[in-house]
Image (cartoon, grey):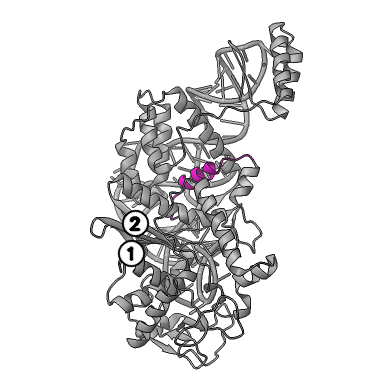
Amino acid sequence: MKIYDTKSRELQQVGTTHGVLNMYCCGPTVYRDAHVGNLRTFLLSDLIARIATLEGMTVNAVENITDVGHMSEDFVEHDKMLQQASLEKIDPFEIARKYEERFHADLSRLNIIPANHYPRASESIQLMQDLIQKLIDSGFAYVGDDGSVYFEAQKFLGYGAISGNKLDSLKPGHRYEYHNDGAKRFHADWALWKSAGDRTEMVWESPWGTGFPGWHIECSAMSLDLLQGHVDVHVGGIDLRFPHHENERAQSNAVIGKEAVDLWVHGEHLLFEGRKMSKSSGNVVLVEDLISRGIDPLALRLCFLENRYRSQMDLTWDSLQAANETLARWRTKMSTWGSSPEITVDTEIEAAFGNDLDTPKAIIRLREIEKSALDNKRELFMYADRVLGLDLDRPDVARTLTDQMQKILDERTKARSEKRWADSDALRVQLEDLGLHIKDTAEGQSWS
RNA sequence: GGUCGGGUGGCCGAGAGGCGAGGCAAGGGACUGCAAAUCCCUCUACACGGGUUCAAAUCCCGUCCCGACCUCCA
């Protein structure tokens, strides 16, 4: 399979190390629920893993859980984990565990296959300290007079290769208020270890005093450790391209003396009703919100798959509704096409998957197959679903009827047999108001 | 100011020099007691101005507009 690499800005063949595809994905920060935009990125790593598996590779996927650190890059008092903890009046670690659990539940509702490892930043402190020490020893990092340890950006040649930013053109304080506190030697230097200051929660002892890790170091530490020093594919949201991935690359490469990551893959952002989904825009949508509107979470997955992962996509309630109906129609048709669990490879779909995850094309092909006269539609759909993960072979769930529903259904059967159409129509409206879909056929009415 | 990516029919969205993707919505038809579901049909576009070419939505130049990132973010 080929995929677009942000660093080289072209399609690259996905490779393996000793026969295993080592993939690292920047995971969630667990101080709140992941919204559907966050989930789009995690779907991206799921797609890569599924396609690689389908192509016969073995996948070793790591996704970190950020439960400490990075939200306080510049303002200690604004640490989001600690803020949320004081808001919910529980221990910050409990907050982290709570939202981590909910994160896994959301992944499962979107049929995202779990990664092999979910390392927590808070449990990788020693790894990070080891890495920081190595960076100090090799002259890439220094201890500031504020007790924090900083990475010296200018020491790493090639800084900016992923984002295209150059150190010279990074203006200090272009969008944020730059505090020259004197500890950093250069404005683009970043903290590897932050001095605790007044903080008493989520802090650790270190050779440089009590403190907590900077945001970027956790990904270097965990990926180098769990993936034996080499990442074949590194996944994350487009916003992480700079500074997070730029800094991560500098740290990792400085430690191992070579390129730690082969391919950098970035997922574009999700807009909702025309605007970037974010807390500040007030348009955050959770998986819960879909469910409460009667939309199958896998309809969201279908919406995502109908758009290229590298394009910003505008999600709307209309598109979710349309996907929900398409999904229902496909499942109904699948059940009329038999019950075989067999798959048949469709070469067009196979090629689309291998060509930079062209799931939109795969879905177009699926619609074509749906309307065709082929007699192995089910097998072709089953094949596509290995990657699409839409549970296309899920049987219709039998609805449980309430006594009231059963009573109205019985009345309507009677009315229909007596050709009292006005009564029949009125009863149908009643049933529909109760949430049933009524179909009248030659054999009588059916409901779902 | 720097770095990315865009502007395609009522809407969403592929395509990347020549055969008008597809979906949603809408309208018409078949089916139905009427519906629903399903199936069939219909409509049609490439931001603007130049240029290259036998041929441009696609390439080149210019203009306008939009979004993202530039030290919080998936």
Give coordinates of residue A339: x percent, y percent.
41, 25
Picture layout, residue A190 above or below residue A122: below
Residue type beneath disc 1:
Leu
Residue tagged 1: A227
Residue lying furthest top: A418
Q: Earlier in the sequence, mark 2 or mark 1?
A: 2
Where, by quadrant of the figure, is residue A181 drawn? bottom right
Q: Residue A60, labelled with which disc?
A: 2
Nearest the viewer among A352 and A17 is A17
Disc 2 element: strand
Give coordinates of residue A17: x percent, y percent.
25, 60
Disc 1 element: loop
Give the Cα distance between marks 2 and 1: 8 Å
Left or right of A426 on screen, residue A227: left
The residue lying at 30 percent from left, 51 percent from top is A58
Give coordinates of residue A373: x percent, y percent.
37, 23
Residue lying furthest left: A18
- Magenta region includes residue A271: no
The residue lying at 52 percent from left, 34 percent from top is A326
Specify the quadrant that holds the C terminus of chain A.
top right
Picture layout, residue A252 above or below residue B33: below
The residue lying at 54 percent from left, 39 percent from top is A323
Chain letter of the residue beneath label 2 in the structure image: A
Q: Residues within 10 Å of mark 1 (few under 14, many from 20)?
A: some
Give coordinates of residue A135: x percent, y percent.
36, 83
Q: Is there any visible trace of residue A139 in the rendered image? A: no
Q: Which residues are magenta?
A: A294-310
Left or right of A199 on screen, residue A236: left
Q: Residue A54, labelled with which disc?
A: none
Residue type beneath disc 2:
Asn
- For the residues beneath circles 2 and 1, the answer to whether they share a chain is yes
